[in-house]
Structures are given as C-alpha cells and as structure tokens.
Amino acid sequence: SAGLSARGDGGDRGNRGDRGDRDHMAREEIRDLERRLAESERRNDRLEGQAQLAQLQVEKLERAQQAEVDDLTHQLRKAQRRAQQLESEANAARRNERRMEREAQVMVEA
C-alpha cells in the first residue's frame, strides 16, 4: 500500500511537472506570437507610411504634369493666335500688292 501511495505521489509530481512544462511552453509560444505580432504591426505601420508617401509623390507628379499641360496649352493657343495674326498680315500684304499692281497697270496704260 505504501508503494502505491509513493507511486501516486510520484505520478502527481510528474503530472505537475508536465503541466509546468506545458504552461512554460504555452507562455513561450504566447511571447513569440506577441513578438511576431508587434513586428508585423511595425512592418504594417512602415508600409502604410511608405504608401502615404508614394501617394503624395503621385499627387505631386500629377499636379506637375497638369501644370505642364496647362502651360503647353497656353503656349499652343498663343502660337495659334500669332499664326492667325501672321496669316492676316500676309493676306493684307497680298491685297496691297495686287492693288499696287493694278495701279501700276493703270499708269502704264495711261
């Protein structure tokens, strides 16, 4: 009977030891998961910051591109107005030349 009791006690100690090992392993696993979660959150924060920075750069480039389009559109309209002005001046010069030719012809005939 004493032997059974000793074995029982020994068995209890063994179970407590196993339970202690399992508790220790669970705590280690929890700490590892918490550490990995914290690393993941830091990485996520870093990526979010990079994404926000990239979005700001995209917006800056879009504004610069729009400014360039606006400037080129302005230059194009200015060049078109100048071309129309030059064409009008050329037409006026041709009309004047024809008039002078007619006047010269009248003088020759007179």
Image: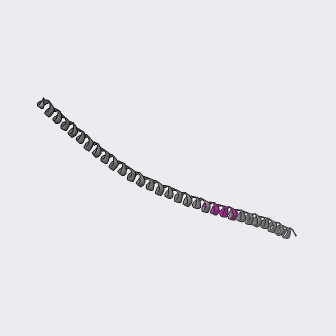
Q: Which residues are magenta?
A: 72-81
Q: Locate the C terminus and report the quarter of the image it occupies.
A: bottom right
Q: Looking at this view, is 71 or 87 the one in front?
A: 71
Extreme residue in the front direction: 1
Residue 48 lies, in percent from the top left, at 45, 53
Which residue is drawn at the image coordinates 23% and 42% (left, top)? 20
Query: Number of labelled discs?
Result: 0
Q: Is residue 20 left or right of residue 98?
A: left
Q: Looking at this view, is 87 or 9 the one in front?
A: 9
Q: Is residue 3 left or right of residue 88?
A: left
Which residue is drawn at the image coordinates 22% and 39% (left, top)? 16
Q: Does 8 lie within the magenta span?
A: no
What is the magenta segment's predominant secondary structure?
helix
Residue 24 lies, in percent from the top left, at 25, 44
Q: Quadrant of residue 92?
A: bottom right
Residue 71 higher or lower than 29, as above or below: below
Extreme residue in the left direction: 3
Q: Looking at this view, is 7 or 99 the one in front?
A: 7
Q: Is residue 69 left or right of residue 11?
A: right
